[in-house]
Amino acid sequence: MSFEEIRNQAIAEWGALQNSKKPRIYVGTATCGQAAGATSILDTIKNELSRLGIDAIITQVGCIGLCYAEPIVDIVKPGRPRISYGSVTPEIITRLIEDYLVKDNPHPELALGTIGEGSIEGIPRFAETPVMKPQVRLATRNCGNIDPTDIKQYIANDGYTGFLRAIKMTPEAVIEEIKKSGLRGRGGAGFSTGQKWEFCRRAPGKEKYLICNADEGDPGAFMNRTQLESDPHSVMEGMLIAAWAIGSTKGYIYCRAEYPLAIERLENALKQMRENGLLGENILGSGFNFDMEIKEGAGAFVCGEETALMASIEGKRGMPRSRPPFPAVAGLWGKPSNINNVGTFADVATIMQKSGEWYSKLGSEKSKGTKTFSLAGKVVRTGLIEVPLGTPLKDIIYGIGGGIIGNKTFKATLNGGPSGGCLPASLKDIPVDYENLSQAGAIIGSGGILVADETTCMVDMARFFLTFTQNESCGKCVPCRVGTRQMLAILTRITQGKGEPGDIATLEKLATLVKSTSLCGLGQTAPNPILTTLRYFRDEYEAHINEKRCPALACKELVSYYVLPDKCEGCQICFRNCPVQAIAGGRRMVHVIDQAKCTKCGTCLAVCPERFSAVTKVSGEKIEVPAEPIPVVVKPKAEKAASS
């Protein structure tokens, strides 16, 4: 069967599915969905359909990106739009199946929105909701909409048409098309993708390698995992196009072993590609030979650096090497090699399906197209998003993200993962693109955006992320091995209230030195959280060092808990819940916390009834309280009523 026949069949099957007379139920079963309970939801659906005698089509899809609303289930009745429901429980899905499929009550109060043509009263169009309206979904266009294990569903939605277009062009013309699009590497550095391909294409030698970097290791980042679990063929198609362009016959997908579902989906995708003539010799009769395999990484963050990644593929310890020569000239096994990120390859497929000119109209002047970001932290709506580059940061946090949890004050974002930079709330209008973030001291990186509120200590945040990069340092070069350890020791002392007057100057000197002299990107970017927090939050460092005070009340060694004598009613709740018996006091007695025994766990503050609010948390100050428990002062009834 020719690929044209395969495509026609896939389109016909997809059309039949969309027009089926049977109800259709879609369940998001990517890792985020499974973690939230999608497996039990799936079992409940099957049981309820059987109990009610309903013949329905159940499809497992990937993640649409709304991690805050998982598990997500979509229901389609024949002739009606697709309705998406979030935060579904077994009880809710039981009610939905009977009430909607049998009694025609769609429960608008439970719906996120409708997808596709048509409308249902009381339910907004999904594309018009605050979380989806600012997004432009290109790389993630199929995520949550198709079965990621079925190549035909990908093909039916224009899948591999970009590759078909590419092999009818010369490799040089394909490279020009990518250059015309303005696409820059989505893995962090932001280098021109077309130019990178051109270097490898022109490098002497017939044997060339293509590598997909799926070694996503940033804390709070899940762009690559979601893409591979939800739409692996978009990445595979991008790799085919790149291989044709640079003249490669062998490819590797380097994915960390901690992503078992992503690896499973990749293995299935490769098998289906071979079955449909998209891998191997003489692909689709074009004379083009290309094959690829999966290489599982051991989870070392440094293997996100391309030369360390190549060393790992070769079976060596994942450690970076000096450059030049660059991988485009001498990479894997000394041969010309090209490495791109998962997101880059997904974008390549879109560009070749549409056009480079079309893609270049999206984004900002120098940062073209869209970018996927993982939105995490103290924001209401966490998840995977895709927006045009140049979108203001505030539109991401307040529009898509829904603002800060508990209506607390937005304080900062960490952009670009543990190697990124911390930007203050005053820069909320900054366009999120390569140039503007770089000028502010941050990076786009792989795409993590971690949101911090007023309770976050920026000194402690810098310490936390430096702990990660210091642990992940391979130790090959002295600046990174020794410098990160020394900076971490200083930050730890500061957060413990042991900071010294010269620590800020020492940190700045060390950070600048490590950044400028480290061998690879890990060491060169590890100081970013320190440099940006010193730039924008120096007052917090000074408070820690000079006043032994944490303004955010977050550093354990710098906070104290007290029971306020004028508010304590002697209910004994804090007394009974203190894990170290640091609280003294009897019934109707003002309680007292023994500061020497207190481990500052915060349990007393958490359990104190809100109507009393008798426990307070302070830093850098001492509150006058009784040395021993004393009787509670009985308040007049009128005063008691007013205070409550």
Image (spheres, rainbow, N blue to C red):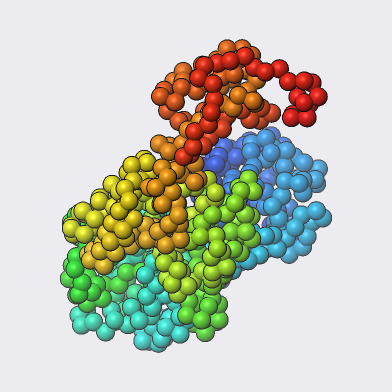
* Left/right of residue 534 with respect to residue 474 in the rendered view: right
* Left/right of residue 641 with respect to residue 14 in the rendered view: right
Check the picture and name the quadrant holding the C terminus.
Answer: top right
Tally of numbered tags: 0
Say which residue appears at 64% left-offset and 38% top-offset: 89
Which one is nearer the viewer's eye here, 155 or 371? Answer: 371
Which one is nearer the viewer's eye here, 180 or 503? Answer: 503
Residue 377: x percent and y percent? 51, 50
Q: State whether residue 221 appears in this view.
A: yes
- In the displayed structure, 65 sits above or below 50; it is below
Q: Quadrant of residue 484?
A: bottom left
Q: State whether residue 421 appears in this view.
A: no
Q: Quadrant of residue 330?
A: bottom left
Residue 521: x percent and y percent? 29, 64
Say which residue appears at 67% left-offset and 60% top-offset: 130
Residue 250: x percent and y percent? 28, 69
Residue 493: x percent and y percent? 32, 44
* Left/right of residue 102 with respect to residue 34 in the rendered view: right
